Amino acid sequence: MSTPLQNLKTLKNSYIKSFDLLKQKFLEKHDSSNFLKKNANLCDQVIKQIWETSAVGDKFCLVAVGGYGRRELYPASDIDLAIICKNLADLEQEKEKIELFIQHCWDFGFRIGVSQRVEDEIKKDIEDITIATNLLESRYISGNQKIYNNYLIKFKKVLNVKQFILNKISEQDQRHSKYSKSGYLLEPNIKESRGCLRDIHFIRWLCAAQFQSHELQTLYEHLIIDKKQLNLLKFHYNKLIKRRIFLHIVANGQEDRMLFDYQAKIASDLGFKNSPDKKSSEYVMNSLYKSIRYIILLNEIITKKFTLQFHKKPQKIKNYPELFKVNGLIELDPKSKKDISKNIFKYFLLYQENKELTGFGPNLISKFQYIAEHKINSSFRKNSLIQQDFVAIFSGQQKVNRSLRLLNRYNILGKFLPVFGRIISQMQHDLFHIFTVDEHTLNVIDNLRRYSKSSLKHEFPESYEAFQRLKHPNILYFAGLFHDIGKGRGGNHSEIGKNEVMKFGKFFNLAPNDTLLVAWLVENHLLMSNVAQKLDLADPSVIRSFADKVSTPERLDLLYLLTTADIRGTSHKVWNQWKSVLINNLHQTTIKYLENRLTNQQMIDQRINQAKSNLMKYSVSFDMYEKNWGLMGPEYFKKFEASEIAWHTRLLLTHSKTKKTIVRVRHQKGGQGIEVLIFTRDKSHIFLRTCHFFHEISCEISQAKIYTTAHHYALNVFHVTYEDESSLRFKDFFKYIESRLTEMIDSCVSLENIKQNQLKKSRQASFHQIEDHIEIHQNEEGFCHLQVKTSNRVALLLSIANVFKNHQINISNAKITTMGERVEDHFDFKKPHETFSLEKLHSELKKLIA
């Protein structure tokens, strides 16, 4: 006679064969609904047998909850179960059998989540929104069904439908915030992101609470949505279901993020192919974004229809007889026969002008949809009155960003401005952006609006002050809208964007000077970022060149605001305090230059005087450091700012010809990361030893200045970041760096122990196939300049330094720049020996970073 464990083994073999067959049929026919139901049924059969084998008894009932309860069981989903009984005594009495059942499930290979519910405690359970939601979509599997039926009857009696709906709406808002408030991520979570599967589950939960049925058809039967909306909702739901099934199969596990790693494979399985213009992965993601877009829209309409039933009677809106106001929403009177198509932008102006209005009602949103689909055409776009209303939105005192975001959500913006329609759902293949182009654009305008609010000036005080100086903020919003509008067409997107602005200005009859200013901003929207991050801001010629291109304080303020808003809108990882300091410094320095128009030498003299003034605050007079400054060489005062010069001077007052290495650490300006000064006699491989040290303590060099003084000392400054500062005691950390790095540089320890690291590109860099760039120049005197552009990765700088060691290269000057996932490094050195080969160095570096 076979044992329960032997039966489980036989059952498992049978299950695996059936499951593999189910997967194979799905891959052949792509019937997603059939797969989910049959997979749930297959698990039902197994779990019933395990339940019976465990002999739990007739005082209990086993039910499926969650996705399993809905019969939506994906290939790698957890299996959620609830065990229900009448009282706690029964639970305690059969505790061992219940534990045996759970253990058998895990031994079988199921990842299960088991909750235990007691009929006597239903009122307490139902206060937990998660438990209440699970019970709404529960389904009987095995055991005493009478217990389940009684429990369900009591549950429905005590459920407060209104409170449940309001709690679920709040929960959904929290989930959206957790997942970037957007479904238009380049790697969205197909289950949890906004506009994805969970948003439809949410709709079904509201439906189940209100109408005791979670079928989408019920929404149509109760006039929540019309037939077309129902069909489209089902269509997009099934599309997402299919992609999630594929995702689990391709990832061979529970992965709900549409990672770049899987997009091409899923695209291939779905029949998408590469074209001359786009990858197959772009086509599959564009298709996904269409579904996300529609689900976000329907989710808003349905949510508002459910909530409006709880609010007071509507109020009339003056001068708009076809509209009324309810719960802060502008709503369309369903009895009105008026053609409102030419008024749509007037309604948005009404929304902007009244603080108490928070949005639009479901009937009006549906009407917007109809107008976008059937009314917005060439003649509509040419209507001068409609154009004036649209342009006026950009001059609003409030809700400019919210208006544009809603216009995009309701499909009006892309239809009215076809040039914007071209970037909707457009992916961005770089290492900076995590959103589609249209979503990034709206994020930028959100950021610009934040700069205007006095309540938020503590976030970015410099940006707030610059915004207050603007005479016409609408110029900035137009620039934000158009700055990336040329993406996805090939070529220079800034140049394409400038040309589109010129067309837009002519078509919409903007003032010529305004059009030219917006066009200039769009054409140069990357200028300030490139100068701040890639060039030496201490060099007066850099400031003069930048100021000449900007030419006026107004342009400078506009470009500064657009630049910071743009970087902040790419990804939370790209913007940091260090970038803020760089761009703010460039902005402030250029403002001063535009006021006085100093020569390079005058700027250096001003810097020297400022450094002297700073030193006097510490009672350090010029005679105390005059000789030291003479040893630094004239280039020193071009390379470092006044505050840096003052810091170096104080630290090196008695160490200008030190025989020992001096290492000092301080917090970086702005508060993120640290600044490390190294002053030592010039010797071989200081750079390599420093890179090795910071690699060993898991710190990243974000920027570095390498300088050799006139008396052949190395004065190197490294800006260093670390992952987790919460566990650091900075006083001890600084002391450790100062002592250990000094020891590392002064020691005679062989560098042979520093092995060449195996560099591995991030999966994003591998997917985007970002081109690496290495360029080396040598002049007649044998001085060489090396530029390296590549994707950032662990130990990259250390590995480059190791290559320098192998070629006996000593760096005389360097600028290290890390920009999120990208690095751009510049090195100066003298030809080390007669047999040195630029070609060999180039080849070795190319191989290293490939």
Image (cartoon, helix red, strand yellow):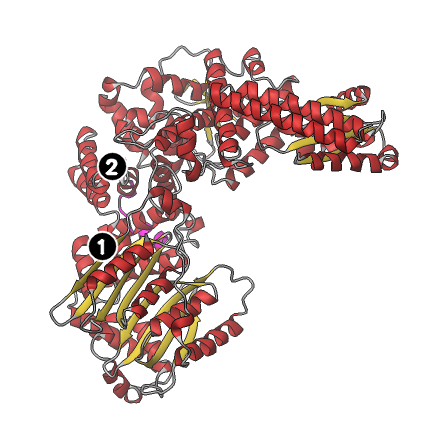
**Which residue is found at the position 37% from the left and 76% from the top?**
678
Q: In front here: 506 or 740?
A: 740
Compared to residue 567, the image places residue 211 above or below, namely: above
Q: Which residue is mark 1?
A: 553
The Cα atoms of the two marked residues, 2 and 1, are separated by 27 Å
Q: Is residue 467 magenta?
A: yes
Q: Is residue 350 visible?
A: no
Residue situated in front as seen by the camera: 355 or 562:
562
Q: Position of residue 46 (x, y in %)?
A: 70, 26
How dense is the environment of label 2, judged by Cα within 10 Å: few (below 14), some, or many (20 and up)? many
Q: Is residue 782 left or right of residue 485?
A: left
SS category of the residue bearing label 1:
helix
The location of residue 306, given as percent across then percent down, is: 57, 22
Instruction: Name the element at disc 2.
Output: loop
Question: Residue 156 vs residue 637: left or right?
Answer: right
Mark nearer the N terminus (2 vs 1): 2
Q: Quadrant of residue 155?
A: top right
Indicate whether 10 appears above or below 742.
Answer: above
Q: Main secondary structure of the magenta part?
A: helix
**Is 782 on the left or on the right of 402, as rendered?**
left
Asked if residue 792 is among those painted magenta in the image, a careful observer would answer no
What segment carries the magenta color? 463-474
* Residue visible at 31% across and 53% down in the picture: 790
Residue at 22% x, 38% y: name it. 497
Q: Quadrant of residue 97?
A: top right
Residue type at tag 1: Pro
Residue, disc 2: 486
The residue lying furthest to the front in this view is 1
Q: Which mark is residue 431?
A: none
Of 692 and 557, nearer the camera is 692
